[in-house]
Image (cartoon, rainbow, N blue to C red):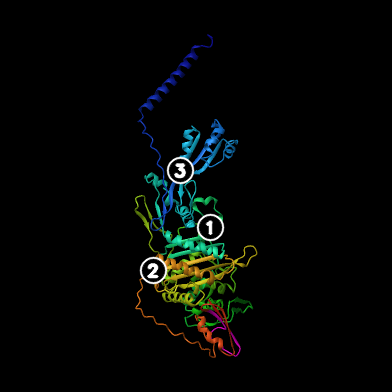
Amino acid sequence: MNAFFKKRRIIGLSLLGALCIIITIYSYFKLALLPVAGKAKNKQTAERGSIVDRSGFPLAVQTTFYRIGLNTKDIKNKENFCKAMAPVLDMSEDELFEKIDKKREYVILKKKATSAEYDLISSVTIENDFTYVNFEKLPGRVYPNYALASQLIGYMGNEGIGLAGIEFSQQDVLSPTIKDLEEGNTKGKDIYLTIDATLQYKLEQIAAETMEETQAESMMMIVADSRTGELLSYISFPAADLNEYGTSPSESKINRPSNNAYEPGSVFKIFTVGIVMDEHGISPNDSFLCDGGYEKRLSSGERVKIGCLDHHGWLTPREGLKYSCNDVLGQISDKISEDQFIYRIKKLGFGEKTGIELSGETPGFVKDPDNKTWSARSKPTIAIGQEISVSALQMVQAATAIANGGVPVKLTVINKITDREGNAVYEHKPELKERALNKTTADYILSCMETTATTGTGSRANLGDVSLGVKTGTAQMADPKNGGYSDTDFLSNCIAIFPVDNPEIILYIVVEKAKGETYAGRIVAPVIGKAADVIIDHMGMSRGKASSVEHNGIITIKKTPTIKLGSLMPDFTGCSKKELLPLMDLPGIKLNLNGSGWVTSQNPPAGTPVSQGTVIELYLE
């Protein structure tokens, strides 16, 4: 022992001990002299802004959900726990026991409990001293109108992040950012959409009826204020219940008006005629002979042929649109160069996104003449709405050019944004785009659409007391399995602009893969009329059958004109069955009447020479 306690070793240990004591005393005094730290403040809860319609009607509001879980090792008596908790968890005792009896240490009892469920479950845990059950607050959303405008509103996930629609695209607006939190702004901004919830509800009822009647796979309906570009209704069916979004079918989550591209068919013809007329390729008085199909032979020997539904005879551009004649539209497309035609199509907004406040928007596809798939038939085919893909939003935005005298207006779904005090931080103002058509051209196309609505393929949309401009279109859909076009799948669509004398509204409806009848003039035009009727009344627009209209009490009944059959076939369009009866007694002429109502088409066409034994086929609706 004496050998161990040597003088040098004792001195070293003493110095080391003294050094430790000095460091300890220094650290103590250093900490003692520091200022007392303030009491930690409770972290403020961030609140997501609401989504409302243009009048403030709530569409998506903030709420709180709870995730309920526990550590299975902390349960003292599993049987007693299951007996008390199973009823409030909406489970059987056996189901709950099996859940907590597994080898997992931590178990989620309920992923998303409402406040009412939380109160009930919490009271049971307190009564039974289940202190090991824990509750985690989750930011949540309640959608009080379920599936109303669901693809537009979108959905917020469990972590407070938007996953679709406005909830996704406007995440930074709705939810406080780090900068907002640093400045003490713990509530996001409220977004006022452009849609009218009441009108949306009324039109969704019409859409649901149409889906049932046509047995269609999907449907779109867009209503826009042609002067401001604000969408008053935004419908994409099937639709998902936003409160059950996670379990909804994938088809109900597709935002079709924004994200889907398709060939529009004959509706596109209004833009073709407008473009070529604007380029002085045709005039209103020009005539084109429809002999049943467009045909063109090239110097190379290549032959281009596009069929038409009828032999329409000589038609003006107006009549070409009225009868939706493929032959006439093909000939009209010959009056403009390929490059200029495509340039003007793009000027109307096709081939690029509209820039609406939604994610995943498709630009569609407009083929250029230098594209390797361009052929001699591309231009006349595009002229009738094929070999080009568009979105419903692009069609509506291009139609604003016709409604606004040639100037398109950018579409929007956001009316205004307000802060937590209700002050507007953003208010929408119409954004006019570059002129796409001359005013005289736009006005002419609109008048042609009115003719189509009164006596043409869109006559079933006609209201009588409010002037509508209409164009219908039925397009074969692509066959993804076998290539080419399907023989059974059709896209039926129709666009309307009204009132014609002072355009305010653009209404566009698309029905995809209807069963049975697919002709747009028969299945979509009537829906246009029904929806337009609702829109006009809802918005309080002036109409002839309104109760406020005055009348002098004098009714003049015009004498039914007598139809005479000369050497040339007259135009029977618009004639009633009663007016046609005298023709039944004419010798050497056979008259076949198909349907009832008024004549919409005929064969032979007007202007055809009449000879002994001529058979006249008239189709009435």
Residue 273 position within the rendered picture, expressed as x and y whole percent measured from the top left = 49, 75
Disc 2 residue type?
Met
Residue 125 position within the rendered picture, expressed as x and y whole percent measured from the top left = 48, 35
Disc 1 residue type?
Ile
Residue depicted at 50% across the width and 83% down the height: 579
Look at the picture and state if 431 lies above or below 293. Answer: above
User: Relative to 136, is 546 on the left or the right?
Assistant: left
Residue 603 position within the rendered picture, expressed as x and y whole percent measured from the top left = 57, 82
Query: Is 614 in the magenta?
Result: yes
Marked residue nearer the N-terminal end (1 or 2): 1
Mark number, residue 116: 3
The residue under label 2 is 541
User: At numbered mark 2, what does the secondary structure look like: helix, strand or loop?
Assistant: loop
- Residue 116 appears in view: yes
Mark number, residue 254: 1
**How many numbered discs sit on the rendered protein?**
3
Identify the main secondary structure in magenta: loop
Disc 3 residue type?
Ala
Classify mark 3: residues with Cα within 10 Å, few (<14), some (14-19) or many (20+): few
Q: Give whichever of 60, 32 is nearer the camera.
A: 60
Marked residue nearer the N-terminal end (3 or 2): 3
The Cα–Cα distance between marks 3 and 1, rounded to whole angstroms, is 32 Å
Q: Which residues are magenta?
A: 600-615
- Residue 347 appears in view: no
Quadrant where the N terminus is found in the figure: top right
Residue 114 position within the rendered picture, expressed as x and y whole percent measured from the top left = 47, 44
